[in-house]
Image: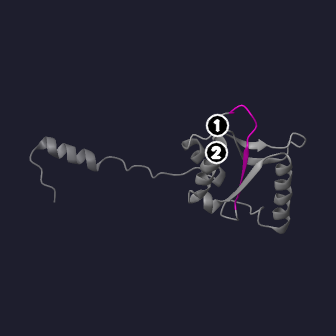
Amino acid sequence: MVRVRDAAELQVYVDRVNQPAKAPVVMNHVPTTEEILGLQLQEAGISYTPQYHFNPSNQNQRVDFGILRPDDLAGKPFLLIEVDGNGTKGHTGAHRSVKGYEADRERDFEMLMLGFTVLRVTTRQVMRGRAIIWIQELVKKAGA
C-alpha cells in the first residue's frame, strides 16, 4: 500500500508507475579483439595504422596494426602487431591450423626481412590488458 499526503504526490506516483519501461540495451555489434585493441591503443595515445600493408610488392599482405614511432608519425611503423584469435568465438581459428600456423611464420620472416619488429598477441592477452602494456613498453623504448 502506498500512502500519499495530497493529490500532487498521488499524481507523481501515478506518473512514475505509468512510465513506459525502458527498452533493454541491445548490442548490435560485438567488438572483435582487434577493435578492442584499437580502442586500447587510442586510450593510451598510441598512433597506429590499422590493417597495415607491410609489403609494398604485395598489397594483400597486411597485419592488424602498424605502430608508429612517437617522434615520426609520418614514417613507416616500427612495430607490427598481429592478433592471433586463438579460435575464440567470432574467430575462424585460421592461426590455429598447421597450414595457418606455417603461413604466419612465413609472414613473420617476410616482416623481419623488411626490417620490422613483429609482436603477436592472443585474444586472452588483449582482454587481460597484457598486450597493451607490452606495446606501451615497446613504444616507450622506441621513443627513448
Residues shaded magenta? 72-85
Which image quarter: residue 99?
bottom right
Q: Which mark is residue 10?
A: none
Q: CA distance from mark 1 to mark 2?
A: 7 Å
**Residue 19: horizontal and vertical position, in percent?**
32, 46
Which mark is first along the chain, 2 or 1?
A: 1
Residue 79 appears anywhere in the view: yes
Q: Foreground residue, 14 or 48? A: 48
Q: In the picture, which quadrant includes the C terminus?
A: top right
- Residue type indicated by callout 2: Val
**Residue 111: horizontal and vertical position, in percent?**
82, 49
Are the residues at dot 1 and dot 2 in contact (C-beta closer than 8 Å)? Answer: yes
Say left or right for 126 vs 79: left
Image: 87 above or below 52: below
Label 1 environment density (alpha carbons within 10 Å; few <14, some 14–19, many ≥20):
some
Say left or right for 19 vs 12: right
Say left or right for 114 vs 133: right
Q: Which residue is mark 1?
A: 70
Q: Which residue is mark 2?
A: 139
Residue depicted at 23% across the width and 47% down the height: 14
